[in-house]
Image (spheres, helix red, strand yellow):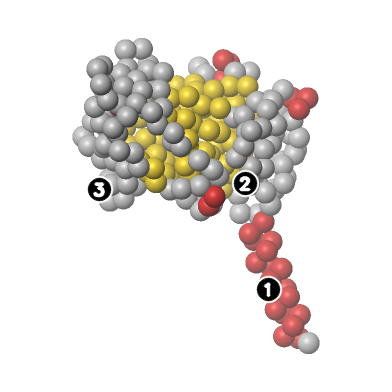
Amino acid sequence: MKRLVAFTALLAACFTSTALAAGINLSWNDCGVYGATNRSFACNSNTLTGAVLVGSYVPPAGTTAITGNEIVIDLVSAGSTLPAWWQFKNFGSCRQTSLSSSADFTSGPFSCADYWSGLAAGGLAAYLTPYMTMPSRARILLIYAVAVENARPMDETVEYYSFKLTINGAKTVGSPSCSGCVDPVCLVLSQIKITQPAGVGDYRLQSPLDHQFATWQGGVVIGGCPGATPTRNTTWGSLKSQYR
């Protein structure tokens, strides 16, 4: 009987530990273990499907009114510079409109929970390159939020969707085209900051659940897929007001 009680207590402790393990995941086309870690493309067409990065997370215990997510993704090329194919958003970039984001999961996928329920507003706030004076690197900033009246607590035992980041195949071939589609790239989900109303308290999630990185064309970078550079709060200073 004593052994049974001890085993039961140990089992309960294990489940409690798992339930409280907040963290983040990044995968292709679905959340966490339901998605893929690598996406390959023959780069022989301007049509690219299934290149959707999905960010997800398990929140910590004690949330009361989640209003938004502030997301940081670091992108690193295997080469010495970031290829033209990976130059997005900024004026004059080779594929300015080939990166888009969303927090609408109402039409799927459905493997994880959808906290947003189609109510989130926001989007791609910035694409910073070169980042930290490194020409092979970029930093992507996303922000999504719901109205305070729609904010509610989250279940610390559930994995939730945060965002979709979609890459299309425009200008891969033909004229004009952008070089570098075949180059390996690593994408690291550096942070999801879960925000709550002022005075309630925010949560900064940086630890991986299963894996917080995804690769393109194998992501062969010397030393493996690099970890994220610590996020500086000042990065968000001029961007939050656009989405709140």
Q: Which residue is mark 1?
A: 10
Mark 1 crowdedness (10 Å alpha carbons): few <14, some 14-19, many ≥20: few
SS label for mark 2: loop
- Farthest left residue in view: 80
Query: Marks 1 and 2: which is nearer the front?
Result: 2
- List x then y, in percent, for residue 105: 62, 33
Mark 2 crowdedness (10 Å alpha carbons): few <14, some 14-19, many ≥20: some
SS label for mark 1: helix
> Answer yes or no: do the residues labelled 3 and 1 have beta carbons within 8 Å?
no
Could you tell me if residue 236 is visible in this image?
Answer: no
The residue that appears at 67% across and 42% down in the rendered structure is: 113
Q: Mark 3 vs mark 1: which is more N-terminal?
A: 1
Q: State the image quarter where residue 73 is shown.
A: top left
Q: For the image shown, how many numbered marks are present on the structure? A: 3
Q: State the image quarter where residue 186 is shown.
A: top left
The residue that appears at 68% across and 52% down in the rendered structure is: 157
Identity, as a three-letter code, of the amino acid under mark 3: Ile
Residue situated in front as seen by the camera: 131 or 162: 162
Q: Which residue is mark 3?
A: 222
- List x then y, in percent, for residue 11: 69, 71
Q: Mark 2 vs mark 3: which is more N-terminal?
A: 2
The residue that appears at 26% across and 36% down in the rendered structure is: 182
